[in-house]
Structures are given as structure tokens and as C-alpha cells.
Image: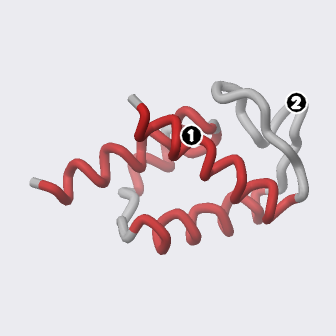
Amino acid sequence: MAEIEKIKKDICSKILRITNKEITENDVNVLGKPYYLEPRSLVYLFMEVQQDYNIDIPEEQLKNQQFATIEGISSIIIKCLNKEDM
């Protein structure tokens, strides 16, 4: 569990750096209230996450809007990292 908490903090710090907005809730869609991130910022985050974690995020993970919450993004990263360990 410590790994996912570290990833959540990392995602929040990336968002802060990209958007200058501090995310304090893990299960709220960052594109809506109260954060209203621009979709372009999420694209930057997506590219940075793939590069920094050396993973390829499958398209289906984006279609179900899981990449819109800190919890969802962290879960995607964990799944991708575990898949590569196999």
C-alpha cells in the first residue's frame, strides 16, 4: 500500500507543477469541480506519467475515464507496472 500512496503524491506534485493547482482529493474528477483542469493538462500529465514510469497506458484505460482521478491514475500505473513485471 505504501507504493500507491507514493504514486498518488507523485501525481499530485506533477499536476501542481503542470497547472499550479493543488489537488487534495483522490477520488474527484480533476476535470470538474473544484479543480477544473484543462484537458490539455491531462494530456501533459499522461505523457509525463508514461515517460517517468516507463509504461504504456492502454487506450481502454482512457475510455473509461479512469485517468481523471488521482485514485484512477494511480491504479492504472500500478496495473501497468505489475503487467511489466510478469
Q: Quadrant of the C terminus?
A: bottom left
Q: Is residue 35 above or below residue 14?
A: above
Secondary structure beneath disc 1?
A: loop
Question: How many numbered discs, if any?
Answer: 2
Query: Which of the 4 image quarters holds residue 20?
Result: bottom right
Q: Which residue is mark 1?
A: 65
Q: Position of residue 41 (x, y in %)?
A: 76, 62
Q: Residue at x 81, y 55 (%)?
A: 16
Q: Is residue 38 above or below residue 9?
A: below
* Colour theme: secondary structure
Q: Which mark is residue 33?
A: 2
Along the horizontal axis of the image, is 54 left or right of 12? left
Q: For label 2, count other residues whose C-alpha is less than 10 Å away and answer few (under 14), some (14-19) or many (20+).
A: few
Q: Residue at x 72, y 53 (%)?
A: 13
Along the horizontal axis of the image, is 41 left or right of 58? right
Q: Amino acid at mark 2?
A: Lys
Secondary structure beneath disc 2?
A: loop
Q: Residue at x 31, y 44 (%)?
A: 79
Query: Which of the 4 image quarters holds residue 31?
Result: top right
Query: Which of the 4 image quarters holds residue 24?
Result: top right
Q: Position of residue 65 (x, y in %)?
A: 56, 40
Q: For label 1, count other residues whose C-alpha is less than 10 Å away and answer few (under 14), some (14-19) or many (20+).
A: few
Q: Quadrant of the N terminus?
A: top left
Along the horizontal axis of the image, is 30 left or right of 64? right
Extreme-front residue of the structure: 2
Q: Residue at x 74, y 55 (%)?
A: 15
Residue 64 vs residue 48, the one in the foreground: 48
Extreme-bottom residue of the structure: 51
Residue 46 vs residue 65, the one in the foreground: 46
Q: Is residue 71 above or below residue 45?
A: above
Q: Amino acid at mark 1?
A: Gln
